[in-house]
Image: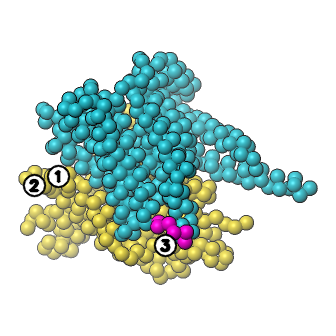
Amino acid sequence: MQSIINLLTRAVFMSTPLILGALGEVVSERSGMMVCAVEGIFLGGAWGGFAGAYLSGGNLLVGFLSAMIVGLLVALLYGFTTIYMGQHQIVMGTAVAILMTGFCTFFYRVIFGTPTSPLKVSTLKKLPLGPLAKIPVIGQIVFSQNIITYIAWILVPLISYFIFRTANGLTLRSCGENPEAVDVAGINVRRVRILAVGFAGILGGVAGAYYSLCNVGMYTSEIISGRGWIAFGICFLGNWNPVGVLIYGVIFGICDALGNYVKALGTSVLPNELFSALPYLLVIIMTALRRSFNVPAKLGTNYIKEE
Amino acid sequence: MNKRGEFGRLIFWTVLAIFLGLLICYLFLPLMGVSPSLAFTTMVTGVFSDKFTMGNILIKTTPLILTGLAFSFTYKANLYNIGAQGQFYVGCMGAVAVSLRLAEKIPGPLVLILACAAAMAGGALTGFIIGFLKAKAGANEFLVSMMSTYVVIYLLQYSLGSWLQEDKHEYLKTNSIKKAVWLPKIIDGTSVSLGIVIAVIAAIVVWLILYRTTLGYRVRVTGQNIHAARLSGINPVREYMIAFAISGAIAGLAGFTEINGMQHMLLTDFESSIGSYGIGIAIMASANPIGVIFAALLFGFLQVGGTVLSHSTDAPASVIDLMLGFVMLFVLMSFFFRRRSELRAMKKQALTKEV
């Protein structure tokens, strides 16, 4: 029983960055912009977060703030070239990913040289929520997580409310469904889109930093290894809906935790690699099985104003 | 608008973009105590001083041509095959399995043909699955192909730890394949194998398929206007599967040229970024199969140049990705400026005609 509770606690812990990244993706994809640079944004966040925290003597707040800034800058680079220069989104995403791989490794070397043992910062502490944390089972799984996790949960209803219940949310969605109409109404489609992409960049930066500052307390160039794309997939599977994102985020958190759990157990009949590949397999199977998607009509198409 | 002016503009903007990309990258080098001018001269003289290093460019170029072609082919059908890396690994497994099991049992050239066929079949199958899911289940091919790479990476890890593992069972790699099943070297004093020839032939064949056969025509029409395609009796669903299978086969072929031509064994993290470089190459070449050869040569040169740079100065190896990233970014941006200058020229032409 205790091991199952531990597994689920770990699952919730590992689902946070996926939820954060996917929430940002939901907001920007609702405006018609796929953030294909998500992998690069995550990596930038992981790097920026670690550098900020380490250089400020282990101050994690500085770490997360610098992760946000790096994430925002990467997203703006992506947004500027796709929205204002009309470049293809998927292609630009790949270019940004390659650039960030080089950039982060290069500047890690510039700032820290080649340390003999890996540099570490102490990871973010858990924050048990007083009496709630004392509830059996649920207390440990849900109410003894760190603050970023709680923020991610609060963001789910907030973003949901923003997208579906506010005038600005309607504008955002219209940019993804019928940008011409939005333009005719006198709203600047490109500005809405770049703001949405910037927001995704900030959340993606925090998500990336979660891996370096909450999970391992250090930075390596393999720290993200496809997690950004998983967040991208969760946005699809969650049907561009924050609540869906939360559900799928937890499912993938369980996958992630299960892989580690089985590895630690070491007595499985099935190969470990199968469990490591599980999240990726799951995305493939689930996208293939789902029949109806509520895809924003203009997702991935750049808006070119007729002149 | 004449074609010549268009080509001239393409060359001008691309060269400018490459230059600016490298310049920005070099401006970061003083942070590591390397002066930009020294870096530039080291790179150029280092690469072109001896035959062996120059040969390395061709070696690096070989798989990049093929992954670039793989992305180009689906791109023509307006599909995105981001999973060339995975298809390449499956191709590697096919080639190495055949080469290990059949070497010295049947004649070398025959093994090579079979290894090539196995690599292409493996890649084609992986690609076909993606195309199938896209066509029959309406899955997003971009997402599925992206994820397939990670699945294949773990499949590769598993295989290297079990049925393909070397005899000592210590490391995650295979035995070296026998010399009889190596692709022959074609230039003395270098390690350049027949692989580069295969890659160039592949580029020409892909060009022929795309522009000189009905198959290629159907694929391109599907990509340009799916409704028109359907009305003229083309079944887009079928074209999706065909395009993905062919794309996968090309990426798988890269596995053959790398295993039998270059590395002679398979190990983990093997050429782990040729898939994403391939996308960059295809786009720089506007998905033109012949253009892919030249874009791949540029990437090959930058990779070898970066390696020389990191060996002979204090610059780290990550400078390669930094260079490639900036060059790609600037080339993509140059498309925007080129288009604008083309439009301006067209307007001017229209004006002079009116007068």
Judged by its main secondary structure, the magenta piece is loop
Tag 3 residue: A296
Which chain's colour is cyan?
B
The C terminus of chain B - image quarter: bottom right
Of residue A86 and residue B284, the one placed in the foreground of this image is: B284
Q: Report the residue marked by disc 2.
A: A268
Per the image, label 3 sits on a secondary structure element best described as loop
Q: Is residue B234 above or below residue A275?
A: below
Q: As displayed, is residue A236 above or below residue B305?
A: below
Q: Verify CB contact (< 8 Å) between mark 1 and mark 2.
A: yes
Give the mark nearer the N terminus: 2 vs 3: 2
Mark earlier in primary sequence (3, 1): 1
- List x then y, in percent, for residue A231: 36, 61
Dot 1 amino acid type: Asn
Q: Which chain did the renderer colour yellow? A: A
Residue A252 in view here: yes
Mark 2 belongs to which amino acid? Ser
* Residue drawn at x 34%, y 73% as measured from the top left: A290
Say yes or no: labels 1 and 2 on the same chain.
yes
Mark 1 surroundings: few (<14), some (14-19) or many (≥20) residues within 10 A = many
Reading the image, the residue beneath label 1 is A272
Name the residue at 48% across, 36% down. B200
Q: Amino acid at mark 3?
A: Pro
Q: Decide: marks 3, 1 in contact (CB < 8 A)? A: no
Q: Residue at x 43, y 35 (%)?
A: B198
* Residue A230 vs residue A24, the one in the foreground: A230
